[in-house]
Image (cartoon, helix red, strand yellow):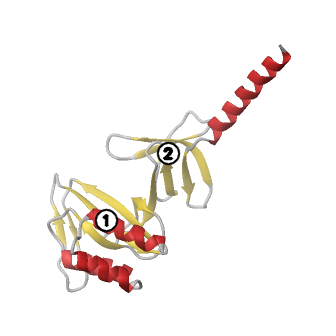
Amino acid sequence: MKILLRSIFCITLLCTFFTQLHAQDFVVTSTNDTIRGEIEKEIFGFYRFKPQGSDNSIKIKRQEIKEFYKAEKEVNFLVRQIPWKRRPEFLERIIKGKIDLFEYGSYGGGAYHPGAPGGAGSFSGSGMSIIEWYACKSNGELFEVKSTSFFGSRRERKENFYKLISDKPELLEKFMKNDDYSLEAIEACIKEYNSN
């Protein structure tokens, strides 16, 4: 009987321990504090955070939070400066490595996005939803490498990507020879770059 009770106690203790270790949502504050809790997405794309042991949830603000992780969907969002935006935005990191790949969605409202000096800008009108993909090396400057927008220069986005992988000439040559500039091809190339 003692052995049975001890076994039940140990199993209960282990289950509790491993439940606590299970992946959990968290935020990283602008002062580099990591706080665990629960992240919920609101109707209009905003996220709210409820710290562990608290009943109150707060809106996640990019001035206070520089990164958050949603364990259920295994997604990581970081505050990054998009070249054409006035203030930093949360971008979803799709690939992490020597080259990071981010996704940013902008919805509704008309906005003008200036291009590079001498380049064409783009306009997104009301009701449009545009997804843009940005890449960077070593947490450096973001470069737009892909977009669902009809505006802007595809050639410029390709050149941005070529510059990022140009320090691996064999990979660059292979990518250019393949002549496939789909998101899947870009992701595969970045993964190959990061693996070497």
How dense is the environment of label 1, judged by Cα within 10 Å: few (below 14), some, or many (20 and up)? many
- Residue nearest the observer in this picture, 8 or 48: 8
State the SS at label 2.
loop
Q: Position of residue 142 (x, y in %)?
A: 38, 73
User: Mark on residue 71?
Assistant: 2
Going by the picture, which residue comes out furthest to the top?
Answer: 1
Q: On the image, which quarter does residue 179 sit in?
A: bottom left
- Residue nearest the observer in this picture, 74 or 37: 74
User: Mark on residue 8?
Assistant: none
The residue at 46%/71% (across/down) is 194
The residue at 41%/85% (across/down) is 167
What type is the residue that disc 1 sits on? Trp
Q: In which quadrant of the rendered image does the N terminus lie?
A: top right
User: Mark on residue 133?
Assistant: 1
The residue at 60%/39% (across/down) is 52
Q: Let me know if residue 123 appears in the view.
A: yes
- Determine whether, in the image, residue 74 is placed left or right of residue 42: right
Q: Are marks 2 and 1 in contact (CB under 8 Å)?
A: no
Query: Disc 2 versus disc 1: distance between alpha carbons?
Result: 22 Å
What type is the residue that disc 2 sits on? Ala
Q: Position of residue 129 (x, y in %)?
A: 21, 54
Q: Position of residue 65 (x, y in %)?
A: 51, 56
The residue at 36%/79% (across/down) is 171
Answer with mark 2 or mark 1, whichever residue precedes in sequence.
Answer: 2
